[in-house]
Image (cartoon, rainbow, N blue to C red):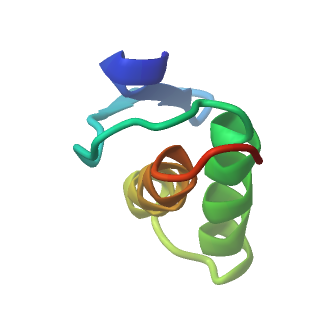
Amino acid sequence: MGENGSIAFDGSKYYECGIVPVKVVDTMGAGDSYIAGFITGAVQKKPLEECMWMGAATASETLRYMGA
């Protein structure tokens, strides 16, 4: 949801996650970066909410640079 964070559903419950505030330079690749961070957490068997925060943190790094 971009600047509004993210929502995930585990089959029975919805989870919401905020953002990691940064000065946005370019949004290209931020969604892909979120997915990469999220999947990294999932592969490490972290709780869903932690996976979401890992995705947000990874996306926030991408937002700081021009281009993907």
Residue visible at 62% across and 47% down?
Answer: 34
User: On screen, 54 above or below 1?
Assistant: below
Q: Nearer the viewer, residue 35 or 25?
A: 25
Left or right: 54 as drawn, with respect to 67: left
Q: Which residue reaches farthest bottom?
A: 44
- Pinpoint residue 57: horizontal percent, then vertical percent: 42, 59
- Count the marks: 0
Residue visible at 26% across and 35% down?
Answer: 18
Left or right: 26 as drawn, with respect to 52: right
User: On screen, 35 above or below 54?
Assistant: above
- Pinpoint residue 35: horizontal percent, then vertical percent: 71, 48
Residue visible at 73% across and 44% down?
Answer: 67
User: On screen, 24 above or below 1?
Assistant: below
- Pinpoint residue 15: horizontal percent, then vertical percent: 37, 32
User: On screen, 65 above or below 37?
Assistant: above
Left or right: 43 as drawn, with respect to 17: right
Residue visible at 47% across and 37% down?
Answer: 25
Q: Nearer the viewer, residue 8 or 20?
A: 20
- Pinpoint residue 9: horizontal percent, then vertical percent: 55, 28
